[in-house]
Amino acid sequence: MIKVNLLYNDNLCELEVKGHANYANYGNDIVCASVSTICIYTANLLLTLGYNPIELKSEEGDFKLVYKLDELLINITKNLEYSLKSLALEYPKNIKLVIGGELC
């Protein structure tokens, strides 16, 4: 199971993802691929827009992204949250999503 923690605290967003979905065999797991795509897309978008994350780690089965929120990044983060919620609802046996704090 993929465990996703999305935490908001003092104008910071912290996204931490650990584990594997085990939906299908390695290389064919659409749930893992979807979560990875959402996370990497968000990190790449921040970098493309010129934002430097406080922390960025991307390894197999382990992803972490921490960044300061501003008006633009709040909207990007709403999209991140919505996308992860949608996947967690669709695949509840494969993704556990925990959201802490409140997004402005």
Image (spheres, rainbow, N blue to C red):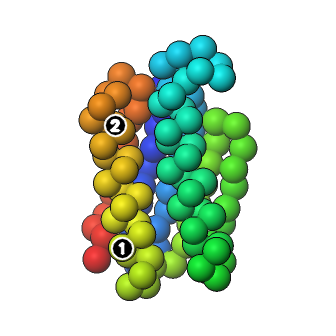
Residue 64 lies in quadrant: bottom right
Find numbered disc 2 in the image and state the secondary structure of the residue it sits on: helix
**Which residue appears at 57% of the width and 68% of the height?**
45
Residue type indicated by callout 1: Asn
Q: Nearer the viewer, residue 73 or 99?
A: 73
Question: Which circle's residue, 1 or 2, is located before the other in the chain?
Answer: 1
**Which residue appears at 40% of the width and 66% of the height?**
77
Q: Is there CB contact under 8 Å for labels 1 and 2?
A: no
Residue 71 against residue 29 in the figure, above or below: below
Residue type indicated by callout 2: Ala
List x then y, in percent, for residue 50: 64, 82
Residue 100 lies in quadrant: bottom left
List x then y, in percent, for residue 6: 42, 55
Q: Tell me the distance, in whole angstroms, between the alpha carbons under discs 1 and 2.
A: 20 Å
Residue 96 visible within the image? yes
Query: In the drawing, what numbered circle is on residue 12?
Result: none
**Which residue appears at 64% of the width and 36% of the height?**
61
- Other-residue count near label 2 (Cα within 10 Å), few / some / many at <14 / 14–19 / ≥20: many
Q: Report the quarter where the C terminus lies.
A: bottom left
List x then y, in percent, for residue 58: 69, 50
Residue 99 visible within the image? no
List x then y, in percent, for residue 36: 57, 43
| Left or right position of 99 against 66 | left
- Other-residue count near label 1 (Cα within 10 Å), few / some / many at <14 / 14–19 / ≥20: some
Residue receiving disc 2: 88
Residue receiving disc 1: 75
| Left or right position of 38 against 53 | left
**Which residue appears at 38% of the width and 47% of the height?**
84
Find numbered disc 1 in the image and state the secondary structure of the residue it sits on: helix
